[in-house]
Amino acid sequence: MIHFQNVCKRYQGGHEALAGVTFHLQRGEMAFLTGHSGAGKSTLLKLVMLMERPSEGRVLVGGQYLDRVPARQIPYIRRHIGVVFQNHQLLFDRTVFDNVALPLEVMGTSPREVGRRVRAALDKVGLLSKERLNPVQLSGGEQQRVGIARAVVNKPPVLLADEPTGNLDPELSSDIMHLFEQFNQVGVTVLIASHDIALIRHLGRRVMTLANGQLRSGDFMPRENSLYGI
Ligand SMILES: Nc1ncnc2c1ncn2[C@@H]1O[C@H](COP(=O)(O)OP(=O)(O)OP(=O)(O)O)[C@@H](O)[C@H]1O
């Protein structure tokens, strides 16, 4: 579903954020991306969502080479990729409902369908009763759930998250990861960048580690019954 072929990314000024990165995330897989601050995690995710382009190498998402996507088609490609950010980027002058409805409104979905889909997404994240509130009236964990509902409201086959639990305590972090697992269980391909090694180990999924822009060999599953070894 997500295929990186020898990808390098140099930013203006020459800094090499990614160097020779190759991996394949299968359709329906859930994996974590970890590594030190500045290792290149956000850069890798930005290449998947076409916020950046590789300097070398190729990125393939859902069978499509992204270098073949012209700029005008980027919004259509992005509809297939839900994104969750650490600071959730909610609009604080709109209700929870309106925040989650945004991606559908951009697509011109009918109001009736918007209502149906937004409520289904809020139900999945346990916030159906709070649709009329403003995000400022919610806790940090609830705000992050609104961000997740917005990311999944148009049922994307791929869900990316950049430090989605960065501001949350361990119990809330675990709840949020559990939500991602639930989306994965219904077939969504999930890739999560996170520093939270303890939580990642507990979840027992594939872990890819970046160090200075390079993917360390020995991509591993942390559980004892791992196919990958450690
Ligand atoms: N737009 C940019 N222009 C120049 N350099 C950048 C840009 N974005 C990121 N970098 C640099 O690329 C490197 C990788 O950054 P990136 O944000 O991908 O790392 P990260 O692993 O996500 O870090 P963190 O965990 O701190 O968020 C860093 O050295 C960063 O300073």
Image (spheres, rainbow, N blue to C red):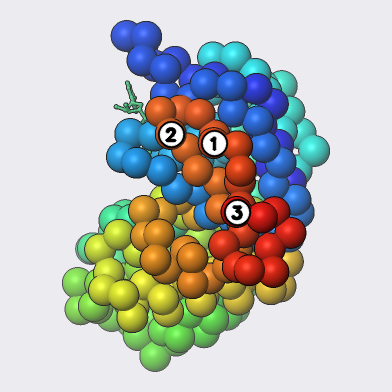
Q: Label 2 crowding class (10 Å Cα cut-off): few <14, some 14-19, many 20+?
A: some
Q: Is residue 208 left or right of residue 132?
A: right
Label 3, label 1: how far apart the Cα atoms are: 12 Å
Q: Secondary structure at mark 3?
A: loop
User: Which amino acid type is shown beneath numbered disc 1?
Assistant: Arg
- Of mark 2 and mark 1, the one earlier in the sequence is 2
- 2 and 1 marks in contact (CB < 8 Å): yes
Residue 18 in percent (x, y) is at 48, 25
Residue 72: image quadrant is top right
Q: Nearer the viewer, residue 92 or 178?
A: 178
- Of mark 3 and mark 1, the one earlier in the sequence is 1
User: Which amino acid type is shown beneath numbered disc 3?
Assistant: Ile
Looking at the image, can residue 46 be seen? Answer: no
Q: Is residue 121 left or right of residue 40?
A: right
Label 2, label 1: how far apart the Cα atoms are: 7 Å
Residue 198: image quadrant is bottom left
Q: Residue beneath label 3, please?
A: 230
Label 3, label 2: how far apart the Cα atoms are: 17 Å
The C terminus appears in which quarter of the rendering? Answer: bottom right
Q: Residue beneath label 2, please?
A: 211
Q: Residue beneath label 1, please?
A: 216
Q: Label 1 crowding class (10 Å Cα cut-off): few <14, some 14-19, many 20+?
A: some
Query: Residue 15: which numbered mark, if any?
Result: none
Q: Please, is residue 30 above or below residue 202 in the view?
A: above
- 3 and 1 marks in contact (CB < 8 Å): no
Q: Is mark 2 within 8 Å of ligand 1?
A: no
User: Which amino acid type is shown beneath numbered disc 2?
Assistant: Ala
Q: Nearer the viewer, residue 142 or 107?
A: 142
Query: Which corner quadrant of the figure contains ligand 1?
Result: top left
